[in-house]
Image (cartoon, rainbow, N blue to C red):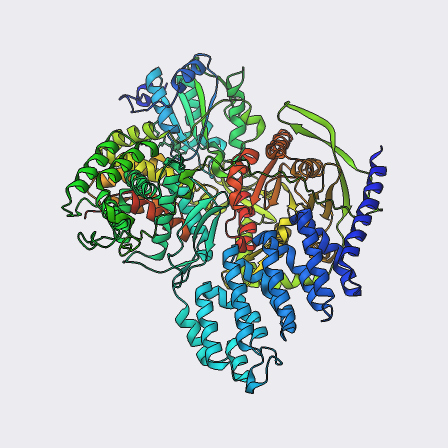
Amino acid sequence: MTDKTQFMVVDEPFYQQQGNEVALYEAAYAARLPVMVKGPTGCGKSRFIEYMAWKLGRPLITVACNEDMTASDLVGRYLLEADGTRWLDGPLTTAARIGAICYLDEVVEARQDTTVVIHPLTDHRRTLPLDKKGELIRAHADFQLVISYNPGYQSLMKDLKQSTKQRFTAFDFDYPEAALETAIVVSESGIDQATAAQLISIGAAARRLKGHGLDEGISTRLLVYAATLIKGGVDARDACRMALVRPITDDRDIRDTLDHAIEATFAQAS
Amino acid sequence: MPDSDRKDNDSAAWRQSLDAYRAALACGFPQVGEVFDDCMHDALTVLSPAGVSAYLDTGRFLGGMGRGVEPVLTFLEEWPPIARTLGEEALPAIAATIRELSKSPNAKAITPFLQTLAAVARRLPSRPQIQRYLDLTLEFAARTTGSIHGIHQTFASPGLPEFFAQAPTLLDNLAIAGLRTWVDYGIRNYHQHPERQRDYFSLRSADSRAVLQRERHGTLLVDHERLLDLYLRALWHDSAQLVPYPTDGEQSPPATPYYDAGGIRLPDVLDEQHGVSAIDCYRAMLAHIAGHRRWSQPMFADNISPMQRLAVEVFEDSRIEALVLRRYPGLRRTFLALHPAPVEGDCDPQNTSCLRHRLAMLSRALLDAAHGYHDAELRKFVGHFHETMAAGDSSSEEIATLALAYIARTRCQSDQLAKVHFADTEIAYRDDNRHLWRFHERSDDEEMFDEHRPTAEVAEPDRLPPRHYPEWDYQSESYRPDWVSLYESLHPAGNAADIDRLLEKHAALARRLKRLLDLLKPQEKQRIRYQEDGSELDLDVAIRSLIDFKGGATADPRINMSHRSSGRNLAVFLLLDLSQSLADKVKLASGGEQSILELSQEAVSLLAWSIEQLGDPFAIAGFHSDTRHDVRYLHLKGYSERWGDLVKGRLAAMQAGYSTRMGAAMRHAAHYLAAQKAEKKLLLVLTDGQPADVDVHDDRLLIEDARKSVEELDQQGIFSYCISLDRKADEYVSDIFGRRYSVIDRVERLPERLPELFMALTR
Ligand SMILES: Nc1ncnc2c1ncn2[C@@H]1O[C@H](COP(=O)(O)OP(=O)(O)OP(=O)(O)O)[C@@H](O)[C@H]1O
Ligand SMILES: [Mg+2]
């Protein structure tokens, strides 16, 4: 059997709680309910799950889904070897066997058939059929399935089916409010509180333009990037333009406005 | 009463009122008869009852002038859109101008004047601006009429009709003050030469163009509304109508920015000042005003002298700026550059009132730590100010106390003198502070309830019986059953070639879309490679895998491929809001203008063409409403119909009118979409305003109902998505559609954005 220690989250990840999500997650885990975390990109979904795995002392197996991924990539496959074939468990199967938390990041990216294989794991059956191997796995008592999902895709094709959605309990994340987000940026990058607060206010400005030519505002992740650049010695204005504005827009009016927000936010050396 | 009876009565009543209006116009031209009903429809959606009678009065005057049908015809058609831009209150001034012209030999110029007035109004969208234009018009007429070779007042002005024709183009480049200078040059040089005058005012002569270039300067507010709107939103979480006012050098004191219920008023044109770009000057004005809107509280002015008020305003302005700079310290450089730096001792208190100078110095000192002034009292109060601010945001009231103390300490006899020192005391980016003062005697309750409702119903004997839909009443949290009557009918047909022409115009865009579409298009048989199980061996991969295997490496077992036909299993429905506001015009970046309706026709045609390429089942319908008894649902394209001349013809005949009762229309569209067998169902709603109807006075009601209908559609597995052309959509659109919406700020880009959005949604 697979060694589960390799999947343990050893050091406590820094996670800034936004509300009572930690307690709620613990309750969902206690009942082994499947969990879905929703929210815009870079708002801390992955970090939250990592933290919960650490807190619960469970191994965590993360799968970043992509559009080429098929059911076999999750479940497992036969490998051809010199002296015959050998079955290799996929990450989902491994998680079900060892009782890990299995985190399927951005499930909507994967092909349709992959979402179907998770269905039997998410209801009372808690089983995973390995059709090719002719085996039916009963999930370990500690196993839990978590998926993440960014409804901000605004794509109909990449929406989850109702029948899939309705198998999960859900957390709806959003960018943290200013004080928390400042704390996150400070802790992640090591810059000072005041500069972090300035970055957060630029982020807030951009988020107000959502729907007016911006599909998504500036993510917490990008704010951490900008802070990291500043910490590394880059001029704050350059760092902001590079990490906050250029990645998110090609619209001239929006770029001008955000560039102006940067100029206005940082006092010039006189 | 059964609905159908009610309808007939209403239609008869409507006919009757139309006849009454027609009688009031008292004008027998048959050509007027042809357009009258349409004009009245349009007029009733914008004008109050008083406005309607003024409209008919002016029409009657023009019809009876003895100058043929043209003037009255033009006026009837042009006035409603002008009123939409300027408000119906603009009519008396315009009518007075028309009367003046009719009394002069220039009556022939009335039609050209009216023909471009709507376009002129869009460039000069406030009444003070348009007044300058009217004044200029009369002055032009007076100075160029009839005095040639001493013969008095017999010749019409040769240049005036040319001028009217060019006015929109000129105003694309000039503010009203620049236009005046350009006109003045032409009149001074050519009032004696009819031919050359015509050349000048039709922009054909070289000097005419040269003067235009010379006068063309600065940054026009109308051209940067979106940028400033984004600024206000992003940095100040605020939004307001930005209304330009005319600027010219002659005025003194110069007009200042201000804001009131009608919006934020800013100069129509600005130049770079003291090294600050025009846009940053506008932003400084908006920052100051946004600061007031956030932090100022109005005070009663009754017991304060004008001098004290001036001081209170200066202290309050400085407080606001201190708060603005706490947020955005980077603005300090801008404020410092724009704020005058009065020189100590420039004003002599022996013979001049120095109050303004004293206060401007103080204001400078509060902004600029390096002010270098020596005056002890000033330095002391600067200290007090900063101590007060150090404790927090302070308040208008508290800072006013400080201001009154300052006045008391520094008052001197000469403050009362008539000779006032003005130099270096104008702080041009600050508003006039009218919002700061309240007066006990004035009643605040000026709100007038206007019960005017444009009743408009057209007899349509051949329509189907209505379908009834419920409507959600959010206050009682319940449905009102069978509340809305929806009539479905085929959209009347127009000329399909019109649509082909629109498509031709966008040939380049269509080519670009085609490339994107090809990527999305399901191949007849799509090959899916790298499959462990599949219908066929993928030879390339298999051989590579075998080589790996023979070489002792792990072989990739995904050596099969399979085929899938059409990857898209999607049905689409496009629902168009055909309410009156669609007739509004927008200015194009390329110059010129276009109605939103026409842009929508282009956009819908391109979208329909795109979807046809992809082969997704696709239907289109439009809707508008005139009370809950009459929601009209107009069928444009059904799922079984091809994108051909029939459908194009209907699209070509599309018209704007009435209101937007969105929920019922969405429910009805959903009923068609639900019958489709596709796996995914998409309802696109294209609208330019919020749900509203003339019989609903609670703004939330139809918004909440539309939200409810989105929920219902969700339950049926229909994904609804809104494309809004309303820049103010933020206030309600996410309440209805959640995150599923886009606002298209630049309406002129709709033709490319709509297909792009569709492709992004279904990629
Ligand atoms: N609550 C939080 N506590 C600590 N760090 C956070 C928090 N929220 C966001 N972050 C920071 O933001 C970064 C991005 O977060 P994360 O990777 O969890 O985003 P995500 O929501 O999973 O995004 P995506 O949808 O793009 O995968 C993290 O690396 C971390 O630096
Ligand atoms: Mg993530």
- Give the side of residue B180 with respect to residue B82, left or right: left
Work out whether residue B47 or residue B503 is closer to the camera in this orientation and state it. B47
Q: Residue at x 85, y 32 (%)?
A: B1
- Give the side of residue B712 with respect to residue B548, left or right: right
Q: Position of residue B388 (x, y in %)?
A: 24, 32
One can see residue B602 in this view:
no
- Give the side of residue B467 with respect to residue B413, left or right: right
Relative height, residue B544 to residue A2 (above, below): below
- Give the side of residue A212 with respect to residue B755, left or right: left
Work out whether residue A188 or residue B148 is closer to the camera in this orientation and state it. B148
Q: Position of residue A207 (x, y in %)?
A: 41, 39
Number of disc labels: 0
Q: Quadrant of residue B28?
A: bottom right
Q: Residue at x 50, y 78 (%)?
A: B200
Q: Position of residue B551 (x, y in %)?
A: 35, 41
Q: Quadrant of ligand 2?
A: top left
In this view, the residue farthest toward the bottom is: B149
Work out whether residue A239 or residue A91 is closer to the camera in this orientation and state it. A239
Relative height, residue B590 to residue A238 (above, below): below
Work out whether residue B573 or residue B302 is closer to the camera in this orientation and state it. B302
Relative height, residue A42 to residue B27 (above, below): above
